[in-house]
């Protein structure tokens, strides 16, 4: 990303082009572990986004004050503070959700998506840009976790967000809500998205080639007429 | 030297701010979390002792134990939370037992990490209702693939035998412990 990137771009790039799960393959531990249902995926992604956005804003605003030798330590303290806030608030206000997500909320501290964004982006960019970047990355993470959790919930439990989707005669695939289902779903989805992006790239190449060929076309056509 | 001091000061300031913030928040959250935990235990007690009207925590034993009373303040039994090993991890359950410790009234699994869809059936009907009015003297027993023929037997779940047996084992261990402390400590 060059410095010329527009503000909108900083947000949008996290959705697809640099999607944390499908493109950068970051934060796999929570991605695979908690996505047994769509609601778990959403909660996990929201918690991660909260931590990501606040850490990015704080770190970006104090980036010039931190000596580079202790920057990682400082980032970890800031991130851990926000993770503890999320953990406490969740335990106090949403005990059911907190129980379902178990140890994965405290483990957001070591989610490399968060530390990665601080090191790669917030430590070098102004506050508002960092905010948009974090929000975009978080949204991308949310989309990925919702898709993964939703697919696993539909096939493994017949439901989506607790509502029954598939009829009763469909026998749920137990494997989908077991750890193996997470790997299978993630692998298939990554394969699908890679194919899509390769196709898109090929189409782009073709249009570029065609644009460059166009000026010659009249010449070729006139040649044909002449003959 | 200058960098070292700069490093120290930066980290100290960040640490202090973070600590102050978290201690404030913890002060707000701690009573709420404690209240949730209490409500959860209370709910479980009334689930395993449907006739209970009030309960009282027994402090004289070294494990968690609740004595329950009916409307006339008459002791009708105990609610005993106990934990042990399941198929993949710890199972924590609460069992309701009559005052003479010979008949169970109810069972509720509080925490488990069993296989979804198979082992988790031990938390649901009809498995849990088998413990209602189950005779626990001298011990709870299990049978596999057949209807229970004795009043102290339950039937294991097909495909979740280990989880079912684990539940029975935990119940027996808990009751043994309760009986032992009743013998040494007299009336509780």
Image (cartoon, grey):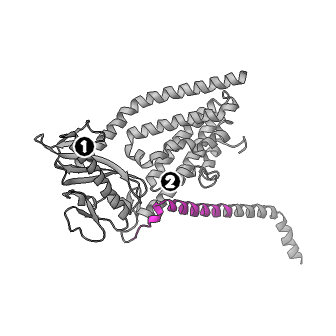
Where residue A29 sits in the image (x, y, percent)? 55, 51
The one of A200 and B18 positioned closer to us in this rendering: B18
Q: Is A52 displayed left or right of A152 in the figure?
A: right
Foreground pick, A31 / A45:
A31
- For the N terminus of chain B, the quadrant is top right
Q: Spot the residue most to the left.
A: B72
Tell me the element at label 1. Answer: helix
Q: Which residue is mark 1?
A: B181
Q: Position of residue B116 (x, y in %)?
A: 41, 60
The question of residue B16 being in magenta is answered with no
Q: Which residue is mark 2?
A: A33
Question: Which segment is the magenta one?
Answer: A170-198
**What is the number of the mark on residue A140?**
none
Q: Chain of mark 2?
A: A
Residue at the image position 83 percent from the left and 67 percent from the top? A218
Chain letter for mark 1:
B
Q: Is residue A105 shown above or below A214?
A: above
Q: What is the crowding at mark 2: few (fewer than 14 residues within 10 Å), some, or many (at least 20)? A: some
Give the image location of residue B122, x and y in percent: 33, 59
**Residue found 35% across the figure and 64% down from its top:** B161
Of tags 1 and 2, which is closer to the observer? 1
Q: Going 18% across and 54% down the picture, which residue do you hit?
A: B103
For mark 1, does the 10 Å Cα neighbourhood hold few (<14), some (14 to 19), or many (20 or more) residues?
Answer: some
Q: Is residue A216 above or below residue A60?
A: below
Looking at the picture, how far across and down is residue A38, in whole percent? Answer: 45, 55
What's the CA distance linking mark 1 and mark 2? 41 Å
Dominant SS type (magenta): helix
SS class, disc 2: helix
* Residue A175 shown in magenta: yes
- Work out which residue is located at the far front of the displayed protein and give it: B184
Residue with the most extreme bottom position: A227
* Front residue of A33 and B49: B49
């Amino acid at each position: 990303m060059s410095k010329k990137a527009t503000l909108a771009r900083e947000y949008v790039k996290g959705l697809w082009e640099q999607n944390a799960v499908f493109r950068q393959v970051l934060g796999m531990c929570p991605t695979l572990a908690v996505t047994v249902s769509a609601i778990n995926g959403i909660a996990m992604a929201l918690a991660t986004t909260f931590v990501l956005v606040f850490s990015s804003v704080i770190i970006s605003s104090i980036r010039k004050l931190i000596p580079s030798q202790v920057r990682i330590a400082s980032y970890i303290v800031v991130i851990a503070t926000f993770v503890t806030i999320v953990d406490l608030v969740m335990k106090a206000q949403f005990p059911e959700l907190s129980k379902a997500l178990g140890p994965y909320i405290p483990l957001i501290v070591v989610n490399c998506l968060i530390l990665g964004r601080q090191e790669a982006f917030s430590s070098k960019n102004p506050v508002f840009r960092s905010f948009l970047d974090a929000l975009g990355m978080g949204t991308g993470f949310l989309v990925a976790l919702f898709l993964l959790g939703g697919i696993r919930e539909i096939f493994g439990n017949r439901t989506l967000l607790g509502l029954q989707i598939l009829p009763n005669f469909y026998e749920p695939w137990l494997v989908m809500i077991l750890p193996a289902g997470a790997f299978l779903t993630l692998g298939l989805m990554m394969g699908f998205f890679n194919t899509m992006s390769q196709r898109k790239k090929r189409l782009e190449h073709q249009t570029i080639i065609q644009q460059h060929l166009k000026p010659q076309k009249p010449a070729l056509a006139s040649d044909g007429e002449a003959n | 030297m200058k960098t070292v001091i700069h490093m120290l000061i930066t980290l100290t300031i960040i640490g202090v701010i973070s600590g102050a913030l978290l201690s404030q928040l913890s002060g707000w959250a701690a009573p709420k979390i404690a209240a949730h935990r209490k409500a959860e235990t209370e709910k479980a007690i009334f689930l395993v002792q449907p006739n209970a009207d009030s309960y009282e925590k027994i402090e004289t034993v070294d494990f968690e134990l609740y004595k329950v009373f009916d409307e006339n303040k008459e002791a009708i039994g105990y609610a005993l939370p106990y934990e042990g090993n399941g198929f993949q991890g710890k199972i924590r359950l609460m069992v309701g037992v009559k005052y003479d410790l010979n008949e169970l009234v109810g069972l509720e699994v509080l925490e488990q990490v069993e296989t979804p869809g198979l082992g988790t059936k031990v938390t649901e009907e009809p498995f849990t209702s088998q413990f209602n009015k189950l005779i626990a003297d001298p011990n709870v027993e299990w049978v596999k693939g057949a209807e229970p023929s004795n009043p102290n037997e339950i039937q294991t779940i097909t495909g979740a035998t280990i989880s079912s047996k684990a539940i029975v084992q935990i119940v027996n261990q808990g009751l043994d412990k309760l009986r032992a402390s009743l013998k040494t400590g007299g009336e509780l």
